[in-house]
Image (cartoon, helix red, strand yellow):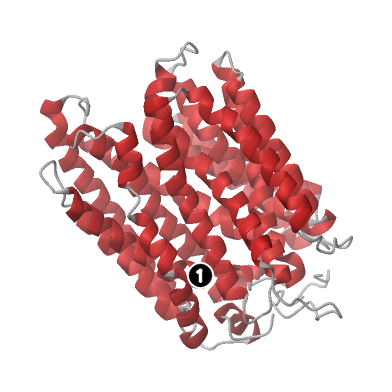
Amino acid sequence: MLRPAQNRPAPSASAAPPGPDAPSGPSRAVVLVLCACVLVAQAMVAAVNLLIPQLAASSLHPSPGGLLWAVDAYVIVFAALLIPAGALGDRYGRKGALLAGLGLFAAGGALSALAHSPAVLIAGRGVCGAGAALIMPATMSVLVHLSTPEGRGRVLATWTLSAGLGGLAGNVGGGLVGEFLTWRALFWAVVPLGALLALAVARTVPRTPARADAAVDPLGALLLAGALFGVVHGIIEGPSHGWASARVLCSFGAGVTLLAAFTGHALRAARPLLDPRIFASRRLRAGALGIGAAFFGLFSLFFVNAQFLQYAKGFSPAQTGLAIVPLTVGMVLVPRLGARLQQRTGPRLPAGAGLGLIGVGLLLVSTVDAGTPYPVYACYLLVLSVGTGLCAPALTLSVVAGLPVHQAGLGSGLNTAAREIGAALGVAVVGTVLASRFHGNPQDPAQAAAFTAAMGVALRTVAVVLLVVTVAVVTGYRGKTGPRDAAADGRGAS
């Protein structure tokens, strides 16, 4: 645990000495159960997007703002609570945090399914997001605790694969529900899924040691959660309300003010929730930036993919959900290659090459139009998926290994927070550029070509930003490697 001395060193991945019960690696059943939890939690981020037309025409009669909040409440609460939730798991036990998260997730699904007003639906989505905030860091930290140093990269590659597949499962499931069922069916499905996963966790997942000395820091948690809430809320609201609107500027102002207050508090506190000095590690900074960049690119694609396939190509909701399946190929087959490459060469090569391929894939997708054959579009998606599978293990390990093993929950929360902020930024940027270039109705066949042209400009903008950030990430992995950074390379102690 960090000392209160003025110049205490940044925490290292080798700070926690191995105990007598050194891990031998998680069993296959444990990995499958934990990854199933990740997949379900991540799927709910994307699934609701495909039900927006149904929700808009439902008996709830949501206003445009209410509809936006029904979609975004999950993401905002999820992102805001990730780091404090990870610290709670470290303090009181990750298995207990995971079970509590699954309970909240199921309760939020039931509340959403029973909603008879937009406010209740929004509240249910927020409860689901709070549950997901407990689920995601708990799953990763259990895997980190149970893994050997040599096997940690492979296990994290599997976790990353599950998170990626969750987004795709959400697209497929949301499309199928949108075509054949009602929106309430999606939320009702969460209840038995949460119960079954909780039962599986209770039976298969071992308890990891709770640490009474792990920092929870209620004031720091409140300040950081408020800061993340303000920043993510501003990012999400920017495209619809305008980046210079009072609402968005106040949101960003509150986020920045709270973040500054958190930083000052953390630098003075003897046991802060998150010591800002951890960002002295160049590899941790590069890993967090790279994770955010990867999801910045992926979620910009997710935002326009459904609209392009339905409005320009004439796909049904179910076909639209299934059409993104090629993204699973690289995510399934490549992460283990990325993990092996990272072990042999360090993170610089797989991270740079993977992020570069995501940027190239976005540039390729930006060239499509209504006449582009779907197999060609699928090949472009494959380029994106290979890039994601290649870079994700190295980037994730860079962040998680930047903290001691006993703070794995905190590291997992930081990793997932970077993902969610990057995803929110991707949607915001592509949505803003699209709105500035296209002012018509994409459902009008006569305007499909104009929509596709604007989509191409938006995706090229995202790709250029991503490729510039890739250079910064690769640069961050350069230079002399110290003990903490060697661990982040996967070639040091754990």
Q: Residue at x 50, y 34 (%)?
A: 72
Query: Residue 263: image x %, image y %?
Result: 68, 56
Query: Residue 400: image x %, image y %?
Result: 62, 68
Circle 1: element type: helix
Q: Is residue 220 visible?
A: no
Q: Nearer the viewer, residue 348 or 323?
A: 323
Q: Residue at x 47, y 66 (%)?
A: 392
Query: Residue 240: image x %, image y %?
Result: 38, 30
Residue 18 in the figure: left or right of residue 426: right
Residue 253 in the figure: left or right of residue 17: left
Q: Quadrant of the N terminus?
A: bottom right
The quarter holding residue 238 reads: top left
The residue that mark 1 highlights is 393
Q: Is residue 356 above or below residue 164?
A: below
Q: Is residue 239 above or below residue 10?
A: above
Residue 111 in the figure: left or right of residue 454: right
Q: Quadrant of the C terminus?
A: bottom right
